[in-house]
Amino acid sequence: MEYIDLHVHSNVSDGTSTPSELVAYAYEKKLKAFALTDHDTVDGVGEAIAAAKSLATDSYEVEVVPGVEISAAYRGRDIHILGLYVDYTDETLVSALHEVAAERRRRNEKMLKKLQDAGLSITMEDLTEGSEDAIITRAHFAKALLKKGHVSSIKEAFTKYLDANGPYYVPREYLSPKMAIELILAAGGVPVLAHPLLYKLSPSELRTLLTELKGYGLQGIEAVYSCNIGLDESFVRSLARDFDLVCTGGSDYHGAVKPDIDLGSGRGNLKIFASILSDLQERKR
């Protein structure tokens, strides 16, 4: 049986492995394919594709699915739309993501100043250390706070300093879900709602969201996911049937940032079948 992973992050956003290191690990894990879906950027995809080709043999090559995970605003929440099989050289997509990155940088500078004004000794260099071109997220703040000794764990950093309801948090300006989906479609990709149960919506609220996103062109929903418990996957698959969506799956691998989640296998029992790839190809426009 061949397995894949359609939700993976590198250090180009908030993971800890380079795109090339991810490819090497995917070969080690004997994956059929994985999607590089960094937050709001496709800048690592070219490196990953080149690395996969360099490690390929006559009998085995890992397919790198060009992807992205775009953050969008929905009724006061941050929801994530995966773009799978996007043209990562598409000028409109790349330009829009660069503007998102610029807005994120402005927000990070404001949040950093709030923390500094509170007496916390972290700098922008602390946030970017080892990944100067990365998309800086709250995970980078958490790592810097931990390294500087201001907290004893990543969890404490989020609880004490980085929580969205806390005094140091600065909200971001997000793309709309409509714009995120349209960007993915225009770049030839398949838009997929990532980890739908993490948004803590009621079943009726989730159906309302899917109705709206489907109207914009949503084609898939992430049914197999590392955080699923109990009947979660069955519930999401029922939604997929009701809304005629492809079921995808991913670990949301970040490397050392989420040490309990492994590439391809999540928390040890994730199985994402390679047959999903043909389902996605059928949905491409």
Image (cartoon, rainbow, N blue to C red):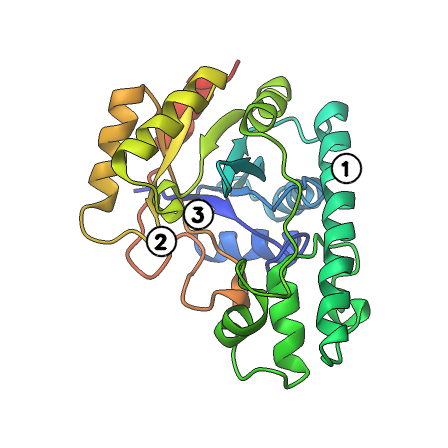
Q: Does residue 72 appear in this view?
A: yes
Task: Kindly report which numbered mark, 3 or 2, lies closer to the viewer in this rendering.
Answer: 2
Numbered disc 1: secondary structure? helix
Q: Is residue 19 above or below residue 117?
A: above
- Residue on which disc 1 sits: 99
Q: Residue 2 appears at what percent x and percent y? A: 35, 42
In front of the other: label 1 or label 3?
A: 1
| Occupied quadrant, residue 115 | bottom right
Please give the name of the residue rendered at 64% of the width and 41% of the height, measured from the top-left corner. 40
Point out the image quarter for the N terminus: top left
Q: Residue at x 24, y 45 (%)?
A: 232
Q: Horizontal and vertical percent for residue 36?
A: 57, 44
Say few, some or many: other residues with alpha carbon within 10 Å of mark 1 (under 14 / 14 to 19 / 20 or more). few
For the point 56% across and 64% down, the residue is 166
Q: Describe the element under mark 2 as helix, strand or loop.
A: loop
* Residue 44 image position (x, y, % from top left): 69, 45
Residue position marked by numbered label 2 in the rendering? 226
Q: Amino acid at mark 3?
A: Leu
- Crowding at dot 2, Cα within 10 Å, few <14 / some 14-19 / many 20+, comes out as many
- Looking at the image, do the residues carrying marks 1 and 2 touch, with CB atoms under 8 Å apart? no
Q: CA distance from mark 3 to mark 2?
A: 17 Å
Name the residue carrying label 3: 31
